[in-house]
Amino acid sequence: MTLVDESQLEVHKPKSLCTPKDNIYIGSWNVRSMYVTGKTAQIEQEMDRYRLDIIGLSEVRWPMNGKTTLQSGKLVLYSGREDGLHQEGVGIMLTKKAKKSLMEWKPINERLMYARFYTSTLKISLIVMYSPTNESPEETKETFTEELQEVIYNTPKHDILLIIGDFNAKVGSNNKGHESAMGKHGIGERNENGERLLDICELNNLVTVRGVRVSYRNNISS
């Protein structure tokens, strides 16, 4: 598949991604590397199959940061390591419709990026993240949590906030003491990353979801 590099986004007045009567579909996928032949095409196919407007990508493994337009017209934004290593990395793939609603985006590091979309009512702030694993050093996990919290803090307060990606977390089935951040349908046993996730949710008035139709409430995916 031929990729065409863009030096900058097409200059235009943003078009509305949705109205209160519309459904938009946003997904996330840990792709285990886009640095292999055919993986970008596979992601495109799955995006079309599920009729997604936006898909957040974790473990992209593209170094540096940038934006690339595919032959189909979809746009890929990515944020990776500055040392050139093909590790970690996050990204967003947008349909042509979603691309036209993109107001701004910011590559932060190999685990975090931010994008903002225009709608006819509230704007949508989207944070894509790829958390260190539960077995990672404590310092690494603390740094990630602090960086994520800083991005959340700097997000416009009246936006719909969605945080998507792979938190490498298990929140478990017991929601006692965490009713405001999770429902009653979790599974398994909570791990340390799950505790961190719930702490972030409660601090920022967020809720964990596995799948959601975008509504006017803040959400985070686990």
Image (cartoon, rainbow, N blue to C red):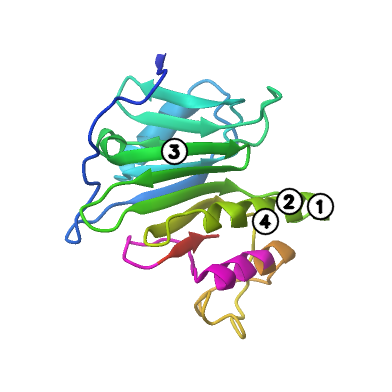
**Amino acid type of disc 4?**
Thr
Tags 1 and 3 touching, CB below 8 Å: no
The circle drawn on residue 145 is 4
**Amino acid type of disc 1?**
Glu
Name the residue beneath numbered marker 1.
Answer: 139
Residue at the spot 72% in from the left edge and 66% down from the top edge: 191
Q: Residues within 10 Å of mark 4 (few under 14, many from 20)?
A: some
Q: Please say whether residue 112 is one of the residues in the magenta stretch.
A: no
State how far apart marks 2 and 1 are (Cα): 6 Å
Is 91 situated above or below 187? above
**Residues in magenta?**
196-217
Name the residue beneath numbered marker 3.
Answer: 105
The circle drawn on residue 143 is 2
Q: Earlier in the sequence, mark 2 or mark 3?
A: 3
On the image, the x and y values in percent for residue 85 come to 70, 25
State how far apart marks 1 and 3 are (Cα): 28 Å
Front residue of 113 and 54? 113
Q: Residues within 10 Å of mark 3 (few under 14, many from 20)?
A: some
Q: Quadrant of the C terminus?
A: bottom right
**Amino acid type of disc 2?**
Thr
Tags 4 and 2 touching, CB below 8 Å: yes
On the image, the x and y values in percent for residue 176 come to 61, 85
